[in-house]
Each structure stands twice: as C-alpha cells, then as structure tokens.
Amino acid sequence: MLLPVPDEDGAPFWEYAARGELRVQACSACGRLRFPPRPCCPHCRSFDSDWRRMSGRGRIWSYVRPHPPLLPAYAAQAPYNVILVELADAPHIRLAGNLVTSADAPLDSMDPARLRIGARVHVTFTETGGMAVPRWLLEKS
C-alpha cells in the first residue's frame, strides 16, 4: 500500500489523525476552511491558520471502483472502491478515501452494491505502515 508523504503544511492533519481526530485547516484571519492544507489563504491571503475539528460525518459525493492494471501495491486488492466524501461540517471540502466494513477491513471489504451517491458515512482511522489513515464507514440508518 502506498502511504501519504506529509509535507510541512499537511503534517498537522496526520498528527491529528494519529489521535483519531479529523481536522481541517482554517484561516485564522477570515475563518474559511481549506483543504488540501496550504500556507496561504486563497480568500484573504493571510498566512495565519489553525486546525478545526470536524464531526467526521459526511456524504459520498462520488466514487469509483478501479480495476487492473493498477499500481502493483494495489493490484492484489482490486477491484476496490475509492470514494469522495463531502464533509457535513464543510460541504465545499471533499476528502478521498475508501468505504470499508470496519476500520481494519481490507479495501475490498464493502459490497459494491452498497455504494451510492449521497450515502451517509463517518470517518474511522486505521494504522497502516506507522500512520493513521482515515477510512469511511456507512452510517447506520
């Protein structure tokens, strides 16, 4: 599996993930949330930021099921899903991830018939290669 490579701007995201928290960078001057993290606010051009805790809830905005040929690290797990989640706390922010049946389940654990645009999900974290990686679980109706 390919692991994220945190940069200076995104490092706090991964530090909070290691604590089981989903946080998004916010401009300290104008208060606008932004993702992916970056040094300057695209709205007011301030370099001041903080990290706001999100509820971890959202909806599937889009999804895809990649099939081989894929990068070798993923080929054995295919086909699996990759979802784009629109955060409930910040609808203009979307995070990519996988919909799984439990935090430590394989990437192909979710029945593809259960994937649907608009399905409510919540974040969970799993330890992979020494990093806490966000994944998504379906909300119980």
Image: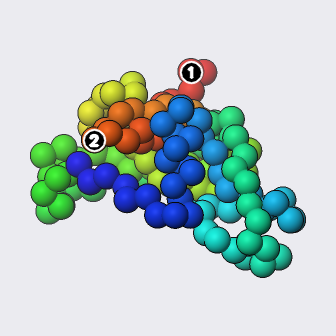
Q: Look at label 2 and name its amino acid.
A: Gly
| Cα separation between marks 2 and 1 | 29 Å
Residue drawn at x 33%, y 27% is 104
Q: Please, what is the three-letter code of the amino acid marked with disc 1?
A: Lys
Viewer-side residue, 54 vs 58? 54
Whether 43 is drawn above or below 68: the answer is below
In the image, residue 57 lies at what x, y percent? Answer: 63, 36
Evaluate if marks 2 and 1 touch, with contact meaning CB atoms under 8 Å apart: no
x, y (%) of residue 82? 38, 50
Crowding around mark 1 (Cα neighbors within 10 Å: few <14, some 14 to 19, many 20+) is: few
Q: Nearer the N terminus, badge 2 or badge 1?
A: 2
Q: Which residue is at 42% across, 38% downward?
A: 132
The residue drawn where x is 70% and y is 41% is 53
- Occupied quadrant, residue 88: top right
Q: In the visual, does 27 lie left or right of 11?
A: right
Is 54 displayed left or right of 1 in the figure?
Answer: right
| 91 left or right of 114 in image | right
Q: Is residue 28 visible?
A: yes
Task: Locate the C terminus and report the quarter of the image it occupies.
Answer: top right
Q: Secondary structure at mark 1?
A: loop
Q: Which mark is residue 82?
A: none
Residue highlighted by disc 1:
140
